[in-house]
């Protein structure tokens, strides 16, 4: 593994410098612990046990380690990342397959930070704390705060960028209880609330547009991350999001389309994960049907977007469907990871998303899939602290 000297050391800051005035007087997270007892607890001391019990192995964990090293080596001097990784001074074109969305810096930075957080690496502790700190600083300093909230929208990434960056800020806050992250995380959530389509309840590329399932998926994950971090998430927003899903569902909720009812595996995986987060029971007939459908489809050899969402659905559902899926998905990723040269630790798979996001996008998705054993505790397992959103 390369001996990495963090390129962003010059921008290391204390995140407590940022807006503490809005931090809650009684921080509920202070009473439950940074890891212990919450839905992210698997990222701490429980990680090794969960890997062994739930289907990971030494090879999958080594792949995660190599991927984090690749991300660290491709951090830009300003602390962020770019989907065009060749712009990084440490790379200078040594890695192939750059993405075309070079200006979607917020999205790229979030997609690089999330695998670190998934592995339990925060800006407070871990081998890569300086890397994570610089990445969070990059996002916070690029947030545009107004009466709408704190926007991380950008022209190329649009609401995808904001949703991804919001997840990163909310997870970092939940994991560390760093009150310096409270205001940025809550402001990011506030912008999601503002950007929701007031009629249909969804989200799309621009604020308050009629929604599509793909953009909706990231916003719901962000809101669930915020809720688990004890940030303010109105029940009305969640209820409206559920109504949007009703408009794109087929087969009584077992399948999902993009902007209208449909049955594509990719949008179905997003819709089902959203339904899980929004409170569907494990024995809900539509969920049982949908999970069986995804299991029969199996992992894709190229579509990491579908693989990312479907892996989470199967992981949360558990049982034989999960065991079958995991055995294929895990080994497929381990075998396809680059092992030589500057590309070592990364992935690139040809797809529409892969060409836009490039090697960084593919590596982020693959790494988060391999972290699935501990990134979140399964929703339907008794020890999981995840609870339904409030709908009133």
Image (spheres, rainbow, N blue to C red):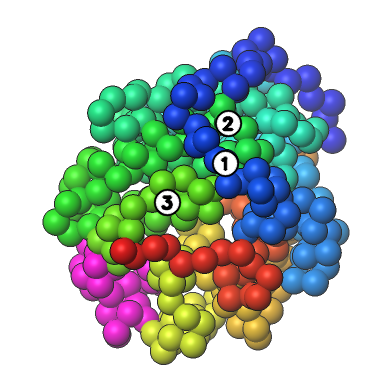
Question: From the viewer's perspective, is 29 left or right of 230?
Answer: right
Position of residue 74 relative to residue 282, above or below, is: above
**How far across and how far down the image is residue 278, in percent?**
41, 67
Query: Residue under circle 2?
Result: 179
Q: Is residue 269 above or below residue 285?
A: above
SS under mark 2: helix
Q: Which mark is residue 374?
A: none
- The quarter in which the N terminus is drawn is top right
SS state under label 1: loop
Taking the spot 46% from the left edge, 67% from the top edge, the residue there is 388
Horizontal and vertical percent position of residue 2: 82, 30
In depth, the one of 381 and 9 nearer the eye is 381
**Does the segment drawn in magenta span residue 267?**
yes
Comparing marks 2 and 3, which lies closer to the viewer? 2
- Residue marked by disc 1: 27
- Please give the name of the residue rendered at 50% of the width and 36% of the height, measured from the top-left corner: 24
In this rendering, the label closer to the viewer, 1 or 3: 1
Q: Residue at x 65, y 83 (%)?
A: 319
Let me know if residue 148 is in the magenta part: no
Residue 83 higher or lower than 273, as above or below: above
- Identify the magenta region: 243-272
Asked whether, in this view, residue 262 is left or right of residue 102, the answer is left
297 sits left or right of 129 in the view: left
**Could you say which disc has been placed on residue 223 in the image?**
3
User: Quadrant of the rendered structure where residue 14 is?
Assistant: top right
Q: Are marks 1 and 2 in contact (CB under 8 Å)?
A: yes
Residue 129 at x, y = what percent?
Answer: 73, 29
Q: Nearer the viewer, residue 124 or 259?
A: 124
């Amino acid at each position: 593994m390369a001996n990495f000297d963090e390129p962003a050391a010059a921008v290391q800051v204390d995140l407590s410098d940022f807006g503490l005035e809005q931090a809650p007087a009684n921080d509920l997270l202070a009473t439950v612990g940074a890891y212990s007892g919450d839905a992210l607890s698997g990222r701490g001391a429980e990680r090794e046990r969960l890997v062994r019990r739930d289907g990971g192995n030494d090879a999958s964990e080594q792949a995660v380690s190599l991927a984090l090293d690749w991300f660290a080596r491709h951090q830009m001097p300003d602390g962020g990342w770019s989907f065009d990784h060749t712009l990084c001074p440490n790379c200078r074109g040594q890695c192939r397959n750059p993405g075309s969305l070079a200006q979607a810096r917020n999205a790229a930075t979030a997609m690089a930070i999330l695998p670190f957080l998934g592995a339990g690496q925060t800006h407070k502790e871990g081998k890569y704390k300086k890397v994570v700190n610089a990445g969070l600083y990059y996002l916070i300093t690029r947030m545009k705060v107004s009466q709408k909230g704190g926007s991380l929208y950008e022209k190329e990434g649009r609401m995808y960028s904001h949703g991804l960056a919001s997840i990163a800020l909310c997870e970092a806050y939940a994991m560390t209880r760093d009150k310096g992250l409270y205001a940025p995380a809550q402001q990011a959530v506030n912008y999601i609330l503002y950007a929701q389509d007031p009629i249909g309840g969804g989200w799309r590329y621009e604020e308050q547009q009629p929604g599509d399932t793909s953009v909706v998926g990231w916003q719901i994950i962000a809101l669930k991350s915020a809720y688990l971090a004890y940030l303010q998430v109105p029940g009305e927003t969640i209820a409206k999001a559920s109504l949007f899903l009703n408009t794109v569902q087929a087969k009584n909720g077992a399948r999902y389309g993009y902007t209208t009812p449909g049955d594509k595996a990719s949008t179905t995986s997003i819709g089902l994960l959203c339904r899980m987060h929004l409170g569907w029971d494990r024995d809900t007939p539509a969920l049982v049907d949908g999970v069986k459908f995804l299991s029969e489809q199996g992992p894709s050899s190229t579509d990491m977007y579908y693989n990312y969402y479907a892996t989470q659905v199967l992981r949360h559902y558990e049982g034989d469907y999960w065991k079958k899926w995991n055995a294929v998905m895990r080994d497929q990723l381990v075998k396809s990871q680059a092992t030589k040269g500057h590309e070592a630790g990364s992935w690139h798979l040809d797809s529409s998303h892969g060409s836009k996001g490039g090697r960084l996008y593919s590596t982020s998705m693959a790494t988060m899939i391999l972290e699935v054993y501990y990134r979140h505790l399964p929703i339907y397992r008794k020890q999981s602290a995840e609870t339904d959103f409030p709908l009133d």
